[in-house]
Amino acid sequence: MRFDSRATSAREALDYWRGSLSQSWDMRLADDADEAHFHADVTMWRMSELIVGAATFGPMQTRMRRERNIQSDQLDHYRLLLVRDGEFHLDAAGQQVSLAPGRFVITDMALPEESESACTSSVLYIPRDTLDAALPQPMRLHGISPDNACAHLLSDHLAALLQGLPDAAPEELPALSAATVGLVAASLAPTAIDPLTTGVAIDGALLRRARRHIEDNLAETDLAAAPLCKLLRVSRSTLYRLFEPLGGVSQYIKERRLARVHQILAQSSDRQPIARLAEDHGFKSAAHFSKAFRAQFGYSPREVPRATEMVRLPTAGGAEDRFDRWLSSLCH
């Protein structure tokens, strides 16, 4: 997938790119930046279960991934960003990182982050389970920026990978993906781990398992705290503690059901009966559902198609290629 802001005006390109990111990040240019100077050149590749790419952005921009973004897109990935040139400053839930050229940082997309950047970078998106399986033990990776021999090799590997992907055969991609994930894991393995960090990682694994079960069973009428406690083999108090940052178990289930209905309405070419959708997703009445829907999204269920319209720009992969859709597809 290729996005080049030079294909249209800076204003249209900025609107398009901001819209493409809007579910996962809030993005704004620096206060003293001129929108007319916005430029972006992005190339992304699907590589088996990974997304790898190169990007150049300017002028200085701020990206914020907040709790509402996390709840909205439900992405369960790690993002690795390696700076080639320029500036990148990150606040990863209190972990402050500034990258020099040649250094990279890992962020956990299930946690808040805020960054300021105007840079050329390589970027890699890895599904959580894929990287976790390659690590020797649970680790909290949010904001980690290793500086060791394997990390330096990874920088060279990503550059060579992006150069070679145009000539790679489809049957080679799984092996290339495995080698890339292995090198990422090797660069992280020497990182010191303390008991508190490991405990956070274990809690994160439990929460991810619970969230995955909820996502797979949104239409089930008995989706509630008690079955989740039984599934996870944890007490009710532990479950409530895990979901406290997300507003509680019941609130989280309601938000995910609303998000699923929103997705159905946005993607369906035929208007489906809203009352039936509400009933199929555990809501007692259409009126209760509509009130909750408006509270979460700021508009009614009937306004979803109009609310999701956005400017489309031509890309090398075709008009239907959008980065947010690529990311979402890694979850399945």
Image (spheres, rainbow, N blue to C red):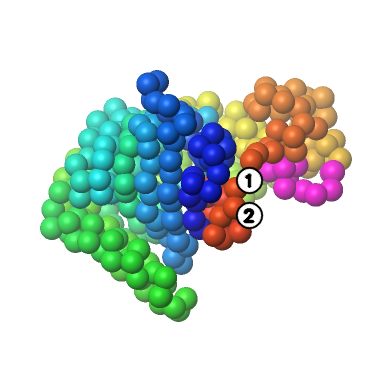
Question: Magenta stretch?
Answer: 261-272
The front one of 313 and 155 is 313
* 216 sits to left or right of 33: right
Inspect the image, locate mark 2, and give the three-letter code of the amino acid beneath it: Ala
Q: Is residue 36 above or below residue 43?
A: above
- Density class for disc 1 (Cα within 10 Å; few <14, some 14-19, many ≥20) is some
Rendered residue at 33%/66% (across/down): 163
Compared across the picture, whether 174 is left or right of 254 comes to left
Secondary element type, mark 1: loop
Q: Which mark is residue 319?
A: 2
- The answer to which of marks 2 and 1 sits earlier in the sequence is 1
Q: Position of residue 162 (x, y in %)?
A: 35, 63
Q: Residue at x 74, y 34 (%)?
A: 306
Q: Are marks 2 and 1 in contact (CB under 8 Å)?
A: yes
Residue 324 shows in the view: yes
Image quadrant for the C terminus?
bottom right
Left or right relative to 240: residue 56: left
- Is 265 in the magenta? yes
Q: Is residue 183 shown above or below 66?
A: below
Find residue 69 and report its horizontal and vertical position in percent. Answer: 51, 34
